[in-house]
């Protein structure tokens, strides 16, 4: 619904129709799904109905800045240098600057993304709504606030005290400063709302991620690009990981899984190579662990790459070993590229893999991939062996995964879902 503002000029009264103004806020545009999602939304919600702006913080040292991705999509973020991932006294400055920017932008919707921006951004939006002379007569600014949980920090990130504090903050923000909460999957809703008691049931909307499906599909034709780079033979299975190299991804588990695969006495398992695409603060330790496990020549660290969709072509399996996830964009893109996936059963991965079809010791065969329930190297390796030695199974999972993603995870679907939510909020 379009807002209408009365404009007076030269003694004449007329109505001027304005586009709905959206302000997205994210802590940092680093490598990962949230940065791409917020850039796509900002880009595509600029039309006759919507006007969108993006506020972003700084990317810390050791993480790749995806500002180039925003530039490629015609998005020029408003940067707040003091807004970063970690708690800091500078948060007071970032809070003030975001509040000041909201006063300048005069948004109809403030949409925050990720935990840190969700906290500072929603407090700024709360202040923007209520810090006006109109509140003296009971008329705060008519701004709605939406928060997207791309993941959550309620387990496996911090200690008990810090985690409890974050849960308490989220409960308070949901109650006093949030109109709608978006989660990416049913499993994520169960964790955030039912397990941790955040928000009321009527606040939640489930909206899966979106990807540019055509772009991914067009770049998955040449298997030789990656395989030549890592010297993979035609008979070798290439397992790929794509993502940030951080503690939450539990890449030591993946390296130990490959070591367990190598030790296994399974007679017909194919030879295997692991390629890790991405960078982060734990890379040096992972490279050291890889050497200690005797995986030199088996594991290759490629670092950050912008041609990830091209690299998917050379992979036979895509793996994820995370302790906690929302819905990982890397798995969605891998499935769209026709790659079978194996992952720990965390967050939205459960919904992504689908119904459990057959149970094994420590892992399960699902409709669209292998779910590792017992996150040990042995269980993960058993699931990997099961998938690696069965080409027909890999082909079946590839087909079902690609069909599922193309039906449910397009950017156009995401934009339509978010647009409908915005319209309903402003009508209400």
Image: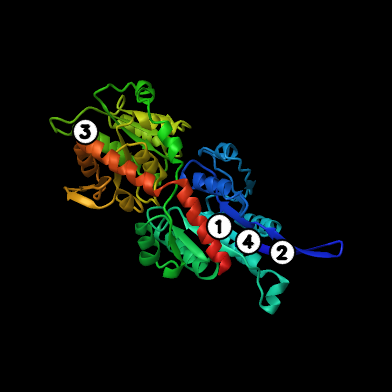
Report the number of discs: 4
Reading the image, the residue beneath label 2 is 5
Question: Comparing marks 3 and 4, which lies closer to the viewer?
Answer: 4
Question: Comparing marks 1 and 2, which lies closer to the viewer?
Answer: 2
Horizontal arrangement in the rendering, residue 111 relative to residue 393 (left or right): right
Reading the image, the residue beneath label 1 is 111
Which mark sits nearer the N-terminus, 1 or 2? Answer: 2
Rounded to the nearest whole Å, what is the CA distance between mark 2 and mark 3? 62 Å
Rounded to the nearest whole Å, what is the CA distance between mark 2 and mark 4? 10 Å
Give residue 391's mark.
3
In the structure shown, which secondary structural element does the residue marked by tag 3 occupy? helix
Name the foreground residue: 10 vs 225. Answer: 10
Q: Quadrant of residue 61?
A: top right
Task: Check whether the beta carbons of the residues at disc 2 and disc 3 lie within 8 A of each other.
Answer: no
Horizontal arrangement in the rendering, residue 132 relative to residue 67 (left or right): right
Relative vertical location of residue 222 with respect to residue 137 in this rendering, above or below = above
């Amino acid at each position: 619904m379009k807002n209408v503002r009365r404009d007076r000029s030269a003694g004449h009264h007329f109505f001027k129709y304005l586009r709905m103004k959206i302000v997205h806020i994210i802590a940092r545009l680093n490598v990962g799904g949230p940065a791409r999602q917020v850039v796509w939304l900002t880009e595509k919600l600029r039309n006759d109905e919507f006007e969108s702006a993006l506020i972003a913080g700084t990317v810390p040292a050791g993480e790749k800045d995806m500002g180039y991705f925003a530039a490629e999509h015609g998005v020029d973020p408003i940067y707040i240098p003091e807004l970063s991932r970690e708690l800091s006294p500078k948060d007071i400055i970032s809070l003030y600057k975001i509040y000041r920017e909201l006063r300048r932008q005069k948004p109809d919707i403030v949409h925050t993304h990720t935990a840190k921006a969700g906290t500072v951004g929603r407090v700024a939006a709360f202040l923007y709504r209520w810090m006006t002379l109109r509140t003296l007569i009971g008329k705060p600014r008519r701004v709605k606030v939406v928060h997207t949980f791309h993941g959550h920090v309620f387990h496996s990130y911090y200690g008990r005290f810090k985690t409890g504090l974050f849960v308490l903050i989220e409960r308070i923000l949901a109650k006093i400063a949030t109109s709608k909460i978006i989660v990416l999957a049913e499993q994520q809703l169960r964790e955030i709302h039912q397990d941790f008691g955040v928000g009321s049931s009527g606040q939640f909307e489930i909206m899966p991620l979106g990807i540019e499906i055509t772009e991914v599909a067009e770049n998955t034709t040449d298997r030789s690009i990656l395989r030549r780079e890592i010297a993979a033979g035609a008979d070798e299975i290439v397992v790929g990981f794509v993502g940030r190299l951080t503690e939450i991804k539990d890449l030591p588990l993946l390296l130990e899984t490959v070591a367990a695969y190598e030790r296994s006495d399974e007679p017909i398992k194919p030879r295997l190579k692991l390629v890790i695409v991405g960078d982060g603060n734990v890379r040096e330790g992972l490279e050291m662990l890889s050497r200690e496990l005797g995986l030199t020549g088996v594991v290759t660290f490629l670092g950050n790459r912008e041609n990830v969709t091209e690299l998917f072509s050379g992979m036979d399996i895509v793996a994820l070993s995370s302790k906690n996830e929302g819905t990982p964009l890397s798995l969605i893109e891998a499935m769209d590229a026709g790659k079978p996936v194996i992952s720990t059963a965390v967050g939205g991965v459960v919904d992504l893999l689908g119904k459990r079809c057959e149970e094994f010791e420590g892992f399960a065969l699902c409709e669209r991939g292998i779910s590792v329930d017992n996150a040990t190297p042995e269980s993960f390796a058993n699931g990997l062996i099961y998938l690696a030695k069965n080409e027909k199974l890999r082909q079946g999972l590839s087909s079902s995964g690609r069909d599922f993603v193309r039906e449910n995870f397009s950017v156009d679907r995401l934009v339509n879902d978010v647009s409908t939510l915005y319209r309903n909020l402003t009508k209400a």
